Amino acid sequence: MVSRVIPVDPFDLVIFGGTGDLARRKILPALYRRYRDGQMPEEARIIGAARSELDADGYRAEIRAAFKEFLRAEECDDQVDAFLERLDYLPIDAMGEGGWPELKTKMRDGVTQAFYFSVGPSLFGALAERLHTNGIARSDARIVVEKPFGRDLGSAKALNATLAQHFDETQIYRIDHYLGKETVQNLMAIRFGNVLFEPLWNAQYVDHVQITVAEGVGVGGRGAYYDKSGAMRDMVQNHLMQLLCLTAMEPPNKFEPDAVRDEKLKVIRALQPVAPADIVRGQYNGNDGPSYVEDAETPDSRTESYIAMKLEIANWRWNGTPFYLRTGKRMKARKSEIVVTFKDTPHSIFDEDAGQRANILSIRLQPDEGIDLSVTIKEPGPGGMRLVDVPLDMTFAEALGPDAENVPDAYERLIMDVIRGNQTLFMRGDEVEAAWAWTDPIIEGWTERRDKPAGYDAGSSGPEEALMLMHRDGRRWRDLT
Ligand code: NAD
């Protein structure tokens, strides 16, 4: 299956923080892949801007080295030189006044204009203001901002207000890279492109939904940063919330930015407050390496590296169907998936021990993106009516044939959407605020109660208490392996 490549319009993309980890590891490799595929036109230009005193050649050398580290060897062909020709650089301090006039002279008329704020959120305001006061950003310019978008409702509102001083909501692209994943978009294709699933997608037929984002790695290296955030702020408020919204939302009337985002917002607003008994927080022990508190270098830290919770969505579609979310560091395996478990048939015509099981639709985000639906069939052979589950598997690697290696990285899709001016897969300001409004009381409750996370062994499936969260409802978490 070869996908069509439609080139985007010529653009000037300025990457503030162009020498940083995200730019070197994700943004520029993604742009290179789009260039190599013919989607980024020859006239496109990328201008790195950061505090380092580099010239364009120095910047190109840095990015060439980054490509050696972050691209597959076979991708680094003769296209690298041609791509690097499209790169320029300016030393600019977001808080200073130098470099802005030079940036203005580099921007071209008649091409799409985008500014990627790949810097900490404390610099967003300074960048927005200087782009404006120096007359650089046009009224149709786009800005891209990264997570974290605030650490609570107050700070998210303040960030939104700061950006709104100089940019309209239609110009602001808040990235959640989970939305750029092929499988996540496929969740919408599966739900709304087939007649099979949508009639069953409700509390009458769905027993429960599990959303898991498990990581094998710990917080080592960024422990000090992570300790101020924790799994709730770092993963649940944004990534898991987005997956929940796409799974639970009503069909939008069109696949258009505001139609989709309106429906997502309604899901967040319908979330019930979560009782303390429906949340389990955990912190990994260092049985085969450093423990969480050692990684975080805070011996008495109460920050969670794991969270599991049971959510209820108070609307007609989902009343009575729980959504179980879990995410953690140093887990048994790296695995992200959305699993929809359907109810049993109303009546079974087979013997009790025949082996009939509920249908399960699982949408795998990583490591191997794909979708499978377990269905019950008769076990082949003459041994009577024995039933088995078999997966109807749509592994993207197989569906894409020889192009399997080229399942695009989320950033490839999202950056091209910025250039195309399509905000569907980006979070709107009110969505982010609604997610914080739901999150804040939960975190405040922990602080008031001086809640202490339960310990769990590194390399395990999480704390015992999280297993109990499921067992008490007569359900179990999917295995992580
Ligand atoms: P980084 O520390 O590696 O890089 C920061 C960049 O910002 C550097 O280029 C630096 O020169 C530049 N910078 C810092 N202060 C500046 C100033 N005053 N003026 C101009 N430039 C300045 O950080 P990063 O990992 O690249 O992350 C950038 C942003 O993206 C952060 O907000 C981070 O939370 C977010 N983010 C990063 C990742 C990731 O994987 N690295 C993932 C998601 C979100």
Image (spheres, rainbow, N blue to C red):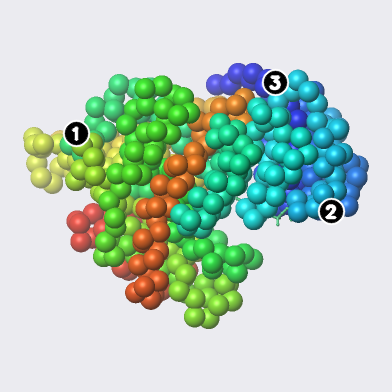
Answer few, some or many: residues within 10 Å of disc 1's Cα (few below 14, many 20 plus, some between 14 and 19): few
- The amino acid type of the residue labelled 1 equals Pro
Task: Look at mark 1 in the image and give the residue it sits on.
Answer: 382
Q: Nearer the viewer, residue 209 or 427?
A: 427
Asked if the residues shown at circle 2 and circle 3 are in contact, with their CB atoms under 8 angstroms apart, the answer is: no
Q: Mark 1 and mark 2: span between their CA atoms?
A: 73 Å
> Residue shown at 55%/21% (left/top)?
1
- The amino acid type of the residue labelled 2 equals Ser
- Locate residue 429 relative to residue 105 in the image: left or right: left
Task: Look at mark 2 in the image and give the residue it sits on.
Answer: 52
Establish if 103 lies above or below 194: below
Q: Nearer the viewer, residue 135 or 378?
A: 135
Q: Position of residue 246 (x, y in %)?
A: 39, 37
Image quarter of residue 476? bottom left
**Does the beta carbon at disc 3 come under 8 Å from ligand 1?**
no
Q: Mark 2 and mark 3: span between their CA atoms?
A: 30 Å
Establish if 19 lies above or below 398: below
- SS class of the residue under badge 2? loop
> Residue shown at 69%/33% (left/top)?
114
**Does the beta carbon at disc 2 come under 8 Å from ligand 1?**
yes
- The amino acid type of the residue labelled 3 equals Asp
Q: Position of residue 188 (x, y in %)?
A: 41, 30
Q: Nearer the viewer, residue 332 or 434?
A: 434
Marks 1, 2: nearer the viewer: 2
Task: Look at mark 3 in the image and give the residue it sits on.
Answer: 9
Q: Mark 3 and mark 1: span between their CA atoms?
A: 62 Å
- SS class of the residue under badge 1? loop
